[in-house]
Image (cartoon, helix red, strand yellow):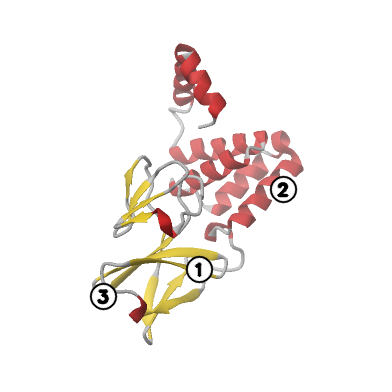
């Protein structure tokens, strides 16, 4: 939440509460995917990059596909214009989201070698850079879990210093995750993005 919005809520709680109640009720008869797509469009119209990333992530978590997001932007062309759609698309491409990759199965992706299995003992977690992406790897016995290092809230890249035992805390808005399961256990409402992984010839590979 911005400092200005926080100030308005504290200065005029009765007015701001009514405003947020209005927004919530105004979309109460829409299905979640439609509400989220409209929220994405409003952030593109305002060209608010942080808000756009946040609501785009939320829309994808709520089941919207990349194709549906693009269709929503194109359908809003009369209100947005080409320049704002291009602005949004540039941000989407920079985020490197699998849902927006062309020419391949977005559930497939490529396999990336991360480490040898001897590099991590049971119960341990490490952070690994793999090309343009960073991941947290947790070993539970003979099993492995690989998580995107970006917080699902606003795509903040969470550093290794944010890990305390099995608790990973995003430094920006204090979302807390259990690294052994990926579940959000404090502040937020969405889990870490988990990537498929496998062991081949003594190496751990993940797919994205």
Q: Earlier in the sequence, mark 1 or mark 2?
A: 2
SS class of the residue under badge 3? loop
**Residue 24 position by quadrant:** top left
Left or right of residue 94, residue 33 in this image: left
User: What residue do we see at 37% from left, 56% from top?
Assistant: 163
Q: Nearer the viewer, mark 1 or mark 2?
A: 1
- Asked if labels 2 and 3 touch by Cβ distance under 8 angstroms, the answer is no
Callout 1 crowding tier (Cα within 10 Å): few <14, some 14–19, many ≥20: few
Q: Nearer the viewer, mark 3 or mark 2?
A: 3
- Residue found at the far bottom of this picture: 201
Q: Earlier in the sequence, mark 3 or mark 2?
A: 2
Q: Is residue 22 above or below residue 116?
A: above
User: What residue do we see at 47% from left, 41% from top?
Assistant: 33
Give the Cα separation between the discs numbered 1 and 2: 30 Å
Callout 2 crowding tier (Cα within 10 Å): few <14, some 14–19, many ≥20: some
Q: Is residue 6 above or below residue 122?
A: above
Residue that carries the numbered disc 2 in the rendered image: 86
SS class of the residue under badge 2? helix
The number of numbered badges drawn on the structure is 3
Where in the figure is residue 196, as x and y percent of width and height? 40, 68
Residue that carries the numbered disc 1 in the rendered image: 129
Left or right of residue 42, residue 166 in this image: left
Where in the figure is residue 4, as x and y percent of width and height? 56, 25
SS class of the residue under badge 1? strand
User: What residue do we see at 70% from left, 37% from top?
Assistant: 80
Give the Cα separation between the discs numbered 3 and 2: 46 Å
Q: Is residue 106 visible?
A: no
Residue that carries the numbered disc 3 in the rendered image: 142
- Asked if labels 2 and 1 touch by Cβ distance under 8 angstroms, the answer is no
């Amino acid at each position: 939440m911005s400092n200005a919005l926080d100030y308005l809520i504290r200065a005029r709680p009765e007015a701001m509460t009514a405003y947020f109640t209005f927004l919530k009720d105004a979309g109460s008869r829409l299905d979640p995917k439609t509400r989220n797509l409209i929220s994405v469009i409003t952030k593109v119209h305002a060209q608010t990059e942080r808000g756009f990333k946040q609501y785009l992530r939320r829309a994808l978590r709520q089941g919207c596909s990349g194709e549906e997001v693009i269709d929503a932007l194109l359908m809003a062309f009369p209100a947005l214009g080409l320049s704002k759609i291009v602005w949004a698309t540039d941000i989407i491409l920079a985020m490197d989201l699998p849902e927006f990759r062309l020419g391949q199965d977005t559930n497939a992706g490529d396999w990336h070698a991360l480490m040898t299995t001897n590099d991590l003992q049971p119960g341990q977690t490490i952070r690994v850079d793999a090309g343009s992406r960073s991941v947290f790897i947790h070993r539970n016995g003979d099993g492995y879990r690989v998580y995107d290092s970006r917080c699902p809230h606003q795509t903040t890249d969470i550093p290794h210093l944010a890990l305390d035992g099995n608790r990973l805390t995003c430094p920006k808005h204090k979302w807390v995750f259990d690294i052994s399961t990926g579940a959000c256990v404090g502040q937020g409402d969405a889990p870490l993005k988990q990537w498929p992984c496998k062991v081949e010839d003594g190496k751990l590979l993940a797919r994205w």
